[in-house]
Image: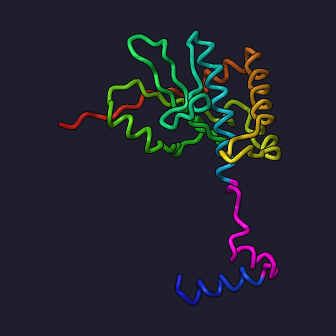
Amino acid sequence: MSREDKKDVIEKIASSLDVKTLEDILSGKLKPSKDEESSASELIGRIGEELAMKWLESRELKPEHVAVTKGQKEYDILVANQTPQQRYIDVKTTIKSVVENNSSAALHIHKEAMRLLETDPDCNYYIIRISLEDIKIAHWNEELKTQFKYSGPERELSAGLIQKIKTRVDKFWQEEGNRQLFQQKTKEFRLNMPKIS
């Protein structure tokens, strides 16, 4: 885009705003609280983490939701009663199907997780990949995102919204058909870094 084109775009944006809004933007008073994509990502991520906790508990494992209890960044869930070593689990949730989609299903690995894998290439690092569409609950995102609010300066999901997510997950998990669908459609795989010598 040429400099002249950029200037035209800026002028169009500026002309669509009132003077007060422009002054607030320029003075720094008007700042976005958080973009919608990030908010949606937190919401669907939390839904997936709650589902993964139920799934692991149903397999008689004792998971700890360390992303919540300890603010862990490298992984979401720790299963410490594994033999011979503990299991680190990163839950990756998407709205769209990962089962019926013939294209790639990309996922983001946090840099903190990459450092953990580089430090300990043989650690039991697992990804649980969940698609809300594949387990027939993609509509939860639309229904819950209207209630999305942050609480406090740490930008966390509100306690009320977290409780609604947990209630829905509990109700979902009570149905045998839902548990079977989750087990059929959810993918779990181990991630490790090859040793290069």
Q: Residue 99 location in percent, x, y?
A: 58, 34
Image side of residue 72 versus residue 131, left or right: left
Relative depth, front residue between 34 and 124:
34
Q: Quadrant of residue 143?
A: top right
The stretch of residues the image draws in magenta is 16-36
At x 61% / y 25%, what residue is drawn?
52
| Left or right, residue 21 beside residue 102 | right
- How many numbered discs, if any? 0
Q: Which quarter of the figure is the C terminus placed in?
A: top left
Rendering coords of residue 59 (x, y %) = 58, 12
Residue 30 in magenta stretch: yes
Residue at 32% of width from left, 34% of height from top?
Answer: 119
Vertical arrangement, residue 50 with respect to residue 36, above or below: above
Picture coordinates of residue 1, whole percent (x, y): 53, 81
- Residue 189 left/right relative to 176: left
Magenta-drawn stretch contains 145: no
* Near-viewer residue (49 or 105): 49
Q: Is residue 9 above or below residue 189?
A: below
Measured along the vertical axis of the image, is residue 122 above or below residue 7? above
Furthest-bottom residue in this view: 4
